[in-house]
Amino acid sequence: MKRTTLSLFAGAAALAAVTGFAAVSAPGDTGAETAEPAARLPVERTSLLCPAPSASDLAETTYTSFTPVTEGAEKKGTATLTAAADGAAAEAGKGGEDAGSGKDGEDAKDGEEGKDGNDGKDGKPVLRPGAPGTPVTGTASGADAPALTGTAEGSHAPGWTVQQTTEVAAGTGRGLLGLNCTAPDTEFWFPGASTASGRTDYVHLTNPDDSAAVVDIELYGKDGVLKSTVGEGVTVPPGGGESLLLSTLTDVEQTDVTVHVNVRSGRLGAAVQALDDKTGGDWLTAAADPAGELVVPGIPADATSVRLMLFTPGGSDADLKVRLASPSGAITPAGHETVHVKAGMTTGVDLGEVTRGEAGSLVLTPTSGSVPVVAAVRVVRGKGGEQESAFIPASDPVGARATAAENRVKGTTLSVTAPDRTAKVEVTASAGTEGGTTATKTFTIEGGTTQNVEVPVPAGLKGTYALTVETVSGGPVYAARTLTGEDEDVASFTVQPLPDDRGTVSVPKAEQNLSVLQQPPA
């Protein structure tokens, strides 16, 4: 009995490190007086999912995997990132302790990547993980690059981040398309999609598990729900991926559409690829969960057009105050002081060149009474035939730590926002994929402002590097990374918010009188 009970305590602590939730107490103990502050422990296992990058034969995709160094993490670990169509996430680790083992089962060295340009279609990992603190890259070309599923354990798990960046030279959706591969979940909101003429939007679903997932896809336009039976009960096969063209789910053309992905059984990764005939395309990733107050971070300073899309899933209308957190403080956009969002209907607002050449983030707060809302913006850079577009969803705060992989000496902008209180953040640049040493800088962000900070660059940098943002004091803090194309004459770009990387979880402490577990001798 004693051994069984103690094993249950140990199991609960382990469960907390993996899932982020556990409660431990001695028998008969209410915990009202003995509970201690929760401890933060590194996660032991995490999963990431990457959608199929492009349907263009001209697509060139780079994957960058990075795990920041986490105090207290296990010394050894593994990670895999393999083709979803093969369901290979569970199989790739067989034959050796480290993921990415060779054909004869020999372990790959930390930091070694596939030299044959493997695209994962044969079940081999696309990436061979480097040691924590060192990013590793892999590539894929053309329209046949598959969706990917990945799992990291041990030292590779806390804060594991994979950036997928695709360059498309011409055609619909040209430009730079990027996203952080996401953890599986059961519900996603995508304000900012469209079924209008000139837009080709797909919702991509990736299933990491060995059983089928069933999902409902709901579309909401300016007048409410767009009726369709095609999006009900969509089955995503085990270890596989599906992409559905939104215009096949409804025959109604709408400029602003909110997509709701609700998983009936199983879990999925989901993202919307939005392609425009005139302004290129990018990924629209899931917005932060519905909330009364929202922050859309990191709108590029040179944005020539900003369109805000909002949706409230409840039964009540929402009235929001719109502010722009600029380098000098909070500004109310002229003519857009407030916005009214009707319940169950998607609202779109053109804000024009709202940033006016300065760093900016949108801060949305209720005028009275808090009603949960989801939000995103569509940003356009450039003019005439040189326009490109990208999407920024409302984001969760940086929290303890957040990471953006695949940064370059030129073309990387890190935007940090403290919408309420002044905050201090520490920004660390990792070693490069091909060499270099870490560098760190600390910045103070005044309350109510957004700053494009001067990011540190690794000494002796070769290749690309990762940026890690940590909240030192104050806050909350929000951040986003803008990556621009290498051709300075083209306005191609992509923006990724930096929410908390969930590298650690809170595990409640509890004092317990172990004597209550001791059994008297037989």
Image (cartoon, rainbow, N blue to C red):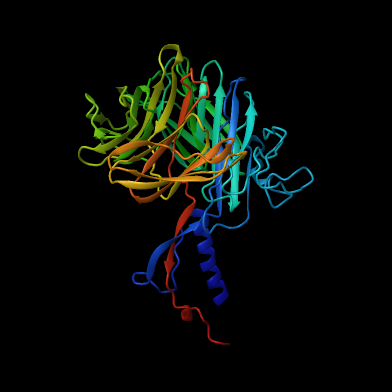
Q: Quadrant of residue 380?
A: top left
Relative to 464, is 282 above or below? above
Front residue of this view, candidates 250 and 340: 340
Quarter occupied by the C terminus: bottom right
- Residue at the (35%, 31%) spot, across then down: 359
Q: Residue 141: horizontal and vertical position, in percent?
A: 64, 26
Residue 319 appears left or right of 312: left
Residue that protrudes farthest toward the top in the picture = 384
- Residue at the (63%, 55%) spot, across then down: 76
Relative to 462, is 7 above or below? below
Query: Would you say residue 321 is visible in this rendering?
Result: no
Q: Residue 427: horizontal and vertical position, in percent?
A: 44, 44
Q: Residue 169: horizontal and vertical position, in percent?
A: 56, 18
Quarter occupied by the N terminus: bottom right
Residue that protrudes farthest toward the left in the picture = 368
Query: Would you say residue 334 is visible in this rendering?
Result: yes
Residue 251 appears left or right of 522: left
